[in-house]
Image (tube, rainbow, N blue to C red):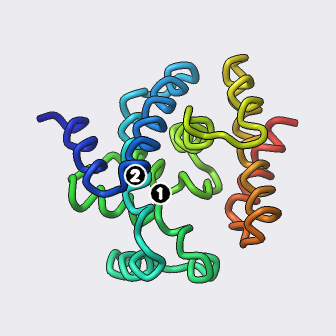
Amino acid sequence: MGLYSIAVSFAEKMVSPQRFCHSVNVAEAAFSIARKVGVDPDRAYLAGILHDIARDFSSGELILAAREEGIILRKEERACPILLHGKVAARIVQARLGIKDEGVLLAIASHATGRPGWTRLEQVVYVADKVEPGRDYPGVEYLREALDRGDFEGALLESLRATITYVAREEKGLVDPQTVVVFNEISQVKA
């Protein structure tokens, strides 16, 4: 059994059936986007299928897993533990599947918030998570159309804007400062 089969099987065991369907959709979207923007599609698929393996953990489980894995919690992550699910997932994947590809691990770790100086692979997984076919929210069609036009940077910028707006307005939650920093970085590039 190859790494990709093992990863798919592992993801299926770690999450609910609905979350697994989402993960498959993200992996396929990441593969497709990666091909268009010059990123290794196999690495994008691998990160996409594994990105949410810790998403169904409770807040307490995320904090405990993060501490066990030596992740230093930022105040935002203590206040909103769901922000940890990517970092925890990356550590689990590294430990349990033996994946050592730093790019794949970073793409898993940063898919929820982005991170300053992130790579194109990380950006691909972030966008794929926002535009996969199961997503249905105001503006998602615009993102998909931007990708169809070949405007990856525009889709990335609007994905970040949509996340910030949604969390601030609808969830009335904490907008992760890393997402704001990344939004500002991409805004400067796009300008």
Q: Position of residue 123 (x, y in %)?
A: 59, 41
Front in this rendered view, residue 116 or 42: 42
Residue at 77% x, 32% y is 154
Q: Which mark is residue 80?
A: none
Q: Secondary structure at mark 1?
A: helix
**Would you say 169 lies left or right of 137 here?**
right
Q: What residue does disc 1 label?
A: 109
Residue at the spot x=21%, y=36% of the render?
Answer: 5
Above or below, 79 against 33 in this view is: below
Specify few, some or many for label 1: CA neighbours under 10 Å numbering under 14, 14-19, or 20 or more: many
Q: Is residue 43 above or below residue 111?
A: above
Q: Quadrant of residue 3?
A: top left
Image height of 146 relative to 128, above or below = above
Is disc 2 surrounded by few (<14), some (14 to 19) or many (20+) residues within 10 Å?
many
Q: Amino acid at mark 1?
A: Ala
Q: Is residue 100 left or right of residue 128?
A: left
Residue depicted at x 36% and y 55%: 16
Query: Is 135 left or right of 106, judged from the image as shown?
Result: right
Dividing the picture into quadrants, the one containing residue 136 is top right
Which residue is the extreme one toward the left?
Answer: 1
Which quarter of the image is occupied by the C terminus?
top right
> Which residue corresponds to the image point at 48% horizontal and 78% vertical from the top-left?
59
Query: Circles 2 and 1: CB distance less than 8 Å?
Result: yes
Kind of residue at disc 2 = Leu
